[in-house]
Amino acid sequence: VNTVGTLLLICGTLVSLTWGKPVVISNTAGRCNTTGAIMDAHDGSYNQWSPDGPWYYYAMGYGGCHQGGDMCAAPCGYGYSWIGVWKSEDMSNSSWALVREARDQGWPDCIYFRVHVVFNPATKLYVLWVNLNGGPADFAVGTSEGPEGPFAFVHSVNVGRPGGGDFDILVDDDGAGYIIYTAVGLGHTMAVERLSEDFLSSAAAHGSGANVSSGVIGNQFVEAPAMFKRDKVYYALFDNCCCFCGHGSGIGVYTAHHPLGPYTYHNNIGCAPGTNLTAGCGCGMDHSVGSLTCAFYGDSLTKAQQNFVIQIPQPDGSRQFVWTGDRWESAPDGVKAHDLQYWSVLEFVPNGAGIDLPVQFTWEDEITINV
């Protein structure tokens, strides 16, 4: 955690206005913490646990290593990592304060990715899931009585399919939890599973009968999912694999009327203008799917890999949905901790069949969120 204060770089200005708390977010400059240093914070989830309460960002930190390549390059990203609990009143630049390392002393000694925290309304505990690499299982789970931790290690756990990787967790209106994840051991394919009532494991891992898994959604070679609910419709966003990749990936849009599906694919809103995707392909790393050749390397608009969709309550009772992604290999000084993020407010339009769909992204140097 002490490495955070040493990662200094000049930050871009991010202006917070006074009317209705609009906050400008830059997509071209680093985000600073309250000390003036670039935040060593990527992946993870943004949560506001109470109305008008502070925002929390549970994020991975990767330290001062230089990746030195366009894709996976051990040990950077696949070596030192830590999990930060960050806190801000409005998510504006220089407002994020580091609360603590999220974990207590009992967690496995291995490589960590993609932390997410949810609140369980039945147990009244905050539950932290994080993906493991080289650990005793595919995920580690911990709990805390408060949002700031520390999170006590509960166990390492596998989900219903082998090689659980990038993931997100949705808590539905009825208090049920669902995990969406890619199964590396099954060709990087995506699925949703219902969590146990305490959110500490997947019901599909226990052989708990029917209605615990969606089965495979979409094609193979996909990762970095985000899942949310809007107006009784469930959205699953994900696209081609992008292993700490500097060229980014797209944003495939899938919808369903139940968290376990069936899911319908609609479009890809994250590829560069004019990209004519082959059916079944995305715009991440080049690869093949059966007889298909998916050669769309470098065609991502954002040059980012999807991270999380923030839901910001609005005065009229609606929510603003803000897409976030990590722009790996974007730091001017090459330090992984200084890589930028890309944020965009999702705009929805009716598709003529009773479902609102997010519109195609266009590049934005900055956006305004209403906090």
Image: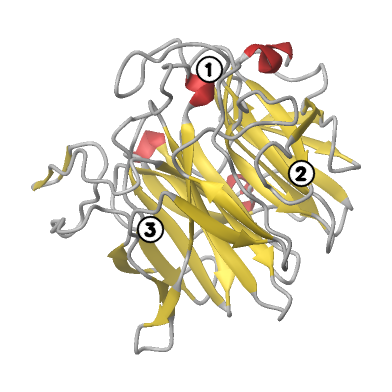
Q: Is 132 positioned to the left or the right of 22 in the image? A: left
Q: Residues within 10 Å of mark 3 (few under 14, many from 20)?
A: many
Considering depth in this image, is 239 or 220 the residue closer to the camera?
A: 239
**Distance from Cα at disc 1 to Cα at disc 3:** 26 Å
> At which x and y percent is residue 209?
59, 60
Instruction: Say what amino acid the circle numbered 3 marks.
Output: Ile
Q: At 73% from the left edge and 16% from the top edge, which residue is drawn?
A: 1
Q: Mark 3 points at which residue?
A: 217
Q: Which colour scheme is used?
A: secondary structure
Closer mark to the observer between disc 1 and disc 2: 2
> At which x and y percent is residue 77?
48, 19
> At which x and y percent is residue 270?
32, 55
Q: At 49% from the left edge and 35% from the top edge, which residue is drawn?
A: 29
- N-terminal of the pair, mark 2 or mark 3, is 2
Camera sees residue 179: no
Task: Indicate the quadrant containing the C terminus: top left, top right, bottom left or bottom right.
Answer: bottom right
Q: Name the residue under label 2.
A: 88
Instruction: Say what amino acid the circle numbered 2 marks.
Output: Ser
Considering depth in this image, is 337 or 198 the residue closer to the camera?
A: 337
Q: CB under 8 Å between callouts 2 and 3? A: no
Asked which secondary structure carries label 1, the reply is loop
Q: Mark 1 points at which residue?
A: 134
